[in-house]
Image: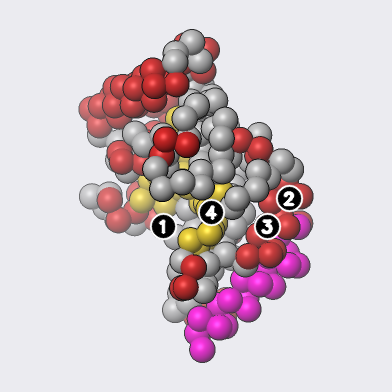
Amino acid sequence: MATLNIYNLFKNYYLEQLTSQDLVLPDIQFRHFRFQLFDKKVLFERLRDILRTREQLYIALARHIPKNAYFTPVKWLNPIYVGKSRKELDVMLSFPLFFDIDMKQLKEPTFHATKKNTERLIDFIRKKYGISPDLVTFSGRQGFHVYYWEFDQQELMKQSPNGRLAQFKKRRKEILLEIQDADITVDYRITADPYRIMRIPNTLHGETGLVAKPVVDLNKFEFSDAKVFESKIYREVFNLDI
């Protein structure tokens, strides 16, 4: 019954509320999209059509009603990825720098500490590389995602397809070592993985019912900012007291 209730809540969101949100993803036509479905017979659905507009992404979300919805921060020449190997994702078209900061990985696993750790990461990248994030989103559960859409773009585009992958991994390893030396906590596996999928901004988290909301002011952001349902629903359906 709980799963049915959650599905109906998500259906309402994707059919009625999402169209008022901005999916804030640039260059959608080069992204790979993957949906985790409520139907466990088809746990993950890889979209087999290239989505070229935000409207087409809205339609896909409304058609599938995903429990969780993901995209690739890296842009790919062939974003469909229908095969069983990663060889079909053969040409990287962008070299984003992206991070996942998860509360449970911190020495002090509190939401306040998670925000402070994320702020320190953003300040470190700004001072070290002179850039600010293009997008910061709440993860939908207990952390944040930070994106820099084009990092090392001009240098890495000179490389061959295999060279791009190798250079991406090399540079990310170097940056992660710098971050580690600065005593900043991120999920190192995610940043180093060019094939990583991340939660689509403004979509719902399947375990919490909270939205992966873009963050304007990190210091002021609270869990309640990611609510799309009544507090009673979060208590009774998701077992969250917000």
**Mark 4 and mark 2: Cα distance apart in space:** 15 Å
* Sequence-earlier tag: 2 or 1: 2
4 magenta-colored: yes
Q: Which residue is mark 4?
A: 46
- The stretch of residues the image draws in magenta is 1-19
Instruction: Look at discs 2 and 1 and give the one toward the viewer.
Output: 2
Residue 142, numbered label: 1
Image quadrant where residue 25 sits: top right
Along the horizontal axis of the image, is 199 left or right of 21?
left
Q: Which residue is mark 3?
A: 60
| Residue 198, disc | none
Q: Nearer the viewer, residue 70 or 222?
A: 70
**Residue occupying the point 36% across, 36% down:** 193
Is residue 123 visible to the viewer in this orientation of the structure? yes
Of the numbered discs in the image, which one, if any, rests on residue 56?
2
Q: Earlier in the sequence, mark 1 or mark 3?
A: 3
Comparing labels 4 and 2, the label whose residue is closer to the camera: 4
Residue that extends furthest to the front in the rendered view of this protein? 83
Which sits earlier in the primary sequence, circle 4 or circle 2? Answer: 4
Q: Earlier in the sequence, mark 4 or mark 1?
A: 4
Structural distance between the alpha carbons of marks 2 and 1: 29 Å
Membership of 232 in magenta stretch = no
Q: Is residue 86 above or below residue 84?
A: above
Q: At 28% from the left edge and 51% from the top edge, which residue is drawn? A: 105
Q: Position of residue 11 (x, y in %)?
A: 66, 72
Residue 122 percent across, percent down from the top left: 44, 32
Q: Marks 2/3: CA distance? A: 6 Å
The disc labelled 1 sits on which kind of residue?
Gln
Q: Amino acid under label 4? A: Arg
